[in-house]
Amino acid sequence: MQRIFSGIQPSGIPTLGNYLGAIRNWVALQADHDCLWCIVDLHAITVWQEPAELTRATREMAATLLACGIDPARHVLFLQSSVPAHARLAWIFNCVARLGWLNRMTQFKDKAGRDREAASTGLYVYPNLMAADIHAYHATRVPVGDDQRQHLELANDIGEKFNHDYGTDFFPRIEPLILGPAARVMSLRDGTKKMSKSDPSDQSRINLNDDAEAIAQKIRRAKTDPEPLPSEPAGLEGRPEARNLVGILAALTGTDLAGVLRAHGGQGFGAFKGTLADALVATLGPIAAETRRLLGDPGALDAILRDGAARAAAVADPIVAEAERLVGFLRLRQA
């Protein structure tokens, strides 16, 4: 089976957008791939994190992933900071990557904004660490969204330059794993903006730990327009909020926009929102309950992450040690 690596930052409880756009796909990939799922806490601190909050958010992310169906027995779930091979290879890649390559990274420009000089150097070299995350496992496939494609191209450039500089074919080429049309979930307050954990309004998103009452309330308050639902997708043109709600129900029920509109075309949003809220509660209710159960036993949760780190290191350590040998580092046996 091909080896997949993917990571997610511990930046709060995932949203419905994270679940439909990524986590649900991760669960499905476990059927026929060798998977490493990493909570990338090293990446998280490229911007300031309050330490106690980072610790709490890391456990919450681990519990949520497990509740969604990530299988720590058949695959590997671990914390990036628990496997030193990531940082060791990242430093080598800092010395392989070129400044010109990093200067072209659009995500740094977006995150740093106008105050570029105040951004951390960690944020600037974030793509090199991402390349190390993948190459440390000789992973050949990475599920990516549009915002990470450029970073994956850079990871291949770094691997290829390493191979060229050291006269080897050590690092394999990474292929993006495209899983078909992604479920792009937008804000419940503004259908032109992506649903985000960083939005200051909690009413803009469905969190995976929201209870049934919170979900129903958020959907009732979700922005819509005064027109009834159309009978076909063309009628959603210019109606971003309507398209968003229809798209969410389509993703939850495994159909498409046309299928949802065949069933609900002509309805007002009052009835439709009730159907959507019921579908959300049916999907997310068990996830929220299992997340709470797992967080109630932090010792057991930490044991899963500790085991995952040991198994991840067993794969990464020999690969990174060989990269260090190729570079010329002198490796002395411990007395």
Image: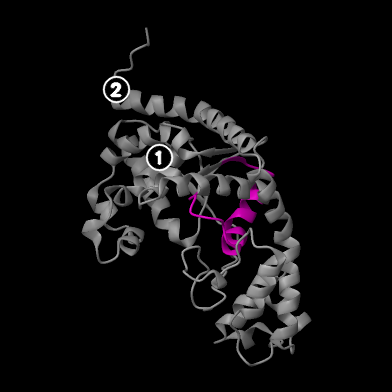
Query: Which amino acid type corresponds to the residue marked 1 in the rendered image?
Result: Ala
Q: Report the side of 62 relative to 106 (left or right).
A: right
Query: Disc 1 marks which residue?
Result: 132
Query: What percent of the width, then of the height, locates residue 39?
Result: 51, 44
Q: What's the mark number on residue 210? A: none
Looking at the rendering, which quadrant does residue 276 occupy? bottom right
Q: Residue at x 50, y 78 (%)?
A: 192
**Image quadrant for the C terminus?**
top left
Identify the residue shown where x is 71% and y is 53%.
289
Rendered view: 192 above or below 284: below
**Magenta region:** 8-36
Q: Quadrant of residue 147?
A: bottom left
> Quick check: 4 left or right of 269?
left
Residue 243 vs residue 274, the one in the foreground: 274
What is the total number of numbered labels drawn onto the structure image? 2
Circle 1 sits in a helix, a strand or a loop, which is it?
A: helix
Which residue is farthest left?
A: 117
Amino acid type, label 2: Phe
Asked if the magenta segment contains residue 20, the reply would be yes
User: Is 143 or 185 nearer to us in this picture?
Assistant: 185
Q: Tag on residue 329?
A: 2
Residue 254 in view: no
Q: What secondary structure is marked by label 2? A: loop
Name the quarter where the N terminus is drawn.
Answer: top right
View extreme (right): residue: 263
Horizontal and vertical percent position of residue 206: 61, 66
